[in-house]
Image: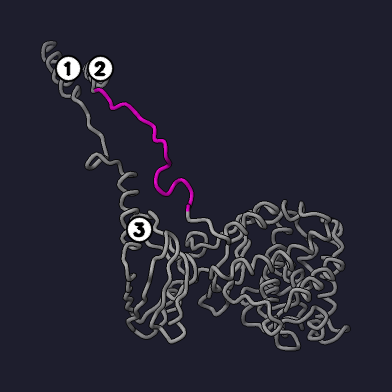
Amino acid sequence: MRLISKILPVLCAGILSGMVSCKKDSFTPITTPPVGLGGDDWKQDSIDVFIHDSMTVPYNVAVYYKWEPGQLDFPSDITPPDAGKVVPVLKALRSVAYNPYNIMTGSNLFLRRYLPKALELAGSAEYLPNGAIFLGQAEGGTAMLLYQVNYYSRLKADSNAFKQMMHTMHHEFGHILNQNVLYPVSFKTISTGYTGNWYNISDADARQLGFITSYAQAAPDEDFVEMVSSMLAGGPNGPSGGYDEYEALLTQTGGPSSPGYQTIKQKEAVIVDYFQRVWNINFYSLRATCRTAFVNYLQ
Amino acid sequence: MKRISLYILVVMMVSAGCQKKDSDSIGGLTPDQRIAKALAAYQSKLMGSQYGWIFVESTTGIAYNQGVSQNGPAITLAYFMQFVDSNTVVMFSDFDTSMSVPKSSSFRIKELTRPALIFDTYSYLHVP
């Protein structure tokens, strides 16, 4: 009690003196945003106009092609995309990866709703210390990352690189679809033997085991989207040594009676059913449309 | 005793009653104004050179990717750069003969922690 009676006057004095303290400078609000906070600004050129007109307006997608390390993986050596490749890549995506969905669903509303709102482009791939490379990423669901833009070519001779890019896009979009509505849980139990060491297994060996690519063996989610993208765009390291059609890939399983073939076919049935039931898309027609778009696009 | 606390009160009021100056301005410019001024100065310096700029880059011989180092040659490279407008640079390099063809790419001068020169689309600079 005695203590409080001693402290109280000092406290009061402190508060009082605080009240009388100085005149404060009047606050004047700034009229222009602080440097760097008004959004990025650079001279808009034909690339930016193209992105606005053919990606942002119809699909509500922002395309980032200028170097922004925070959008990629910091400790990796990745090069920015070549400005001259940006528009050709986007045109190819539009014709070969996006348009089939538009045709199947009747309008661009489906993609406008489900495409991730940001598409980020990088010139090279992201190389991992274990020798694997990232060709694309869509883990966050809000952004889709497409690497190796600088290797783009629509020549028939380079169809491998082109198919790889479309495979990547279908793969990432497959992720988006299964993140919106999950595939039947029973899919996860069709195969066993998912492993983090998928990069030590060749694609051909993976097919014997009932996985369409070795990456499909990484996890059920990857298995699902690798199936989708391999059916729509073909898969790597087929009988020809490069990207081959789904049917050609199946010959590496060991024939229709082999367990690998039957496992893959079982997965195919789940996917076709999933697309029909959840998205009301006939997967086989979608596949035919993708194939036509693809063949027509190569020069 | 009472008198002492009164004195203490008065002293406190007087010492607290000063005018506080809390300003980040230097030379009458706020940080934002100084940053904008510095960015504009760098921009005009880069573009102001009549014959362009020569950038010299020395590699250390060790490159890091995801924390894993790799050895390469320790070499010195030169780049000739002409900053043609506020976002475009034309350059060639002595890395190899194919890079004697001038290539146009984009750059930006942006405030990061300090004003930074960013080559934000693919150029010869990104090869080594």
Residue drawn at x 43%, y 63% as measured from the top left: B107
Residue A38 x/y as whole percent: 46, 46
Taking the image as shown, residue A242 lies to the left or right of residue B45, namely right
| Residue designated by label 2 | A16
Q: Amino acid at mark 1?
A: Leu
Residue A143 visible: no
Q: Mark 2 to mark 1: distance in Å? A: 9 Å
Q: Depth-wise, is mark 3 or mark 1 nearer the camera?
A: 3
Task: Label 2: state its secondary structure.
Answer: helix
Q: Mark 3 to mark 1: distance in Å? A: 56 Å
Stretch in magenta: A23-41
Q: Disc 3, disc 1: CB below 8 Å?
A: no
Which comes before the other along the chain, label 3 or label 1?
A: 1
Residue drawn at x 82%, y 65% as measured from the top left: A271
The question of residue A26 being in magenta is answered with yes
Q: Disc 2, disc 1: CB below 8 Å?
A: yes
Q: Amino acid at mark 3?
A: Gln
The answer as to whether the residues below labels 2 and 1 share one chain is: no
| Residue designated by label 3 | B43
Residue B61 x/y as whole percent: 35, 82
> Residue B33 falls in which quadrant of the image?
top left
Residue A35 x/y as whole percent: 39, 47
Q: Disc 2, disc 3: CB below 8 Å?
A: no
Count the labels in the image. 3
Which label was assigned to residue B9? 1
Residue A69 visible: yes
